[in-house]
Image: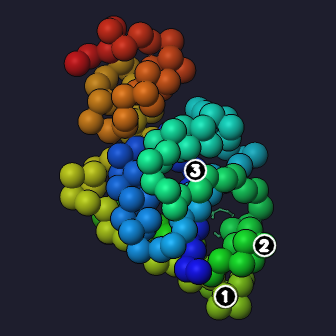
Amino acid sequence: MHAAIYPGSFDPMTYGHLDIIKRAAGMFDEVIVSILDNRQKTPLFSVDERVNILKEATKDIANVKVESFSGLLIDYAKEKNINIAIRGLRAITDFEYELQISQTNRLLSKGALDTIFLTTSLEYAYLSSSSVKEIASFGGDISRCVPSFIEDMVYEKYGISKNEAER
Ligand code: PNS
């Protein structure tokens, strides 16, 4: 069985992430979306909230599983006996960071963990979780960035009702 891990913060998941998940699910028998539980960052959504969001967003894709992990990705991947990580590349600006992570993972895992990059579909190239949070915090329109149920949850975090937000 060919399985892959799609690791990330997903705070929150965007249409860009969902696009990568769907495409990866078409390539592998199983895709495990793995949310990093990073104690050093203060996320907008807790790990449990993010797991639930991802589960809801991917409920119709049979070969996608959602989990969380802490610590090193290579240790988590080894535990799962998976040797492929998927990452999305939006633009050249992502490249340096992604190259560093993937090379570090190959080195640390002694070649056991490889990364496959999928280029983001053009319509989502501009999207990032941080910009979604920034726009929403000022009441801006994020309807083109995230599914509607996530939109509600993001505005709620900032104490803004969807009707108040610019449309
Ligand atoms: O969505 P993000 O925040 O860009 O995802 C980054 C992530 C989670 C893929 C990366 O930070 C990660 O794998 N962290 C786990 C710790 C680790 O393995 N670090 C070594 C590689 S630099």
Left or right of 45, for residue 57: left
Residue at the image position 43 percent from the left and 59 percent from the top:
21
Report crowding for label 3: few under 14, some 14 to 19, many 20 or more residues within 10 A (C-alpha): some
Residue at the disc numbered 2: 79
Which residue is the extreme one toward the bottom?
111
Q: Measured along the vertical axis of the image, is residue 52 above or below residue 153?
A: below
Residue at the image position 78 percent from the left and 73 percent from the top:
79
Q: Earlier in the sequence, mark 2 or mark 1?
A: 2
Tell me where residue 114 appears, x and y as whole percent. 56, 83
Is residue 100 visible in the rendered image? The answer is: no
Tell me where residue 17 appears, x and y as whole percent. 42, 53
Residue at the disc numbered 1: 112
Numbered tag placed on residue 9 in the rendering: 3
Q: The N terminus is located in which quarter?
A: bottom right
Q: Amino acid at mark 1?
A: Ala
- The response on whether ligand 1 sits within 8 Å of label 2 is no
Report crowding for label 2: few under 14, some 14 to 19, many 20 or more residues within 10 A (C-alpha): few
Numbered tag placed on residue 90 in the rendering: none
Q: Measured along the vertical axis of the image, is residue 71 above or below residue 86?
A: above
- The response on whether ligand 1 sits within 8 Å of label 3 is yes
Asked where in the image residue 72 lies, by quadrant, the reply is bottom right
The residue tagged with tag 1: helix, strand or loop? loop
Tell me where residue 62 appears, x and y as whole percent. 49, 56
Left or right of 106, for residue 57: left
Q: Earlier in the sequence, mark 1 or mark 3?
A: 3
Is residue 37 visible in the rendered image? The answer is: yes
Residue at the image position 65 percent from the left and 77 percent from the top:
82
Q: Measured along the vertical axis of the image, is residue 165 above or below residue 99?
A: above
Q: The C terminus is located in which quarter?
A: top left
Q: Amino acid at mark 2?
A: Glu
- Out of 62 and 88, give the one closest to the viewer: 62
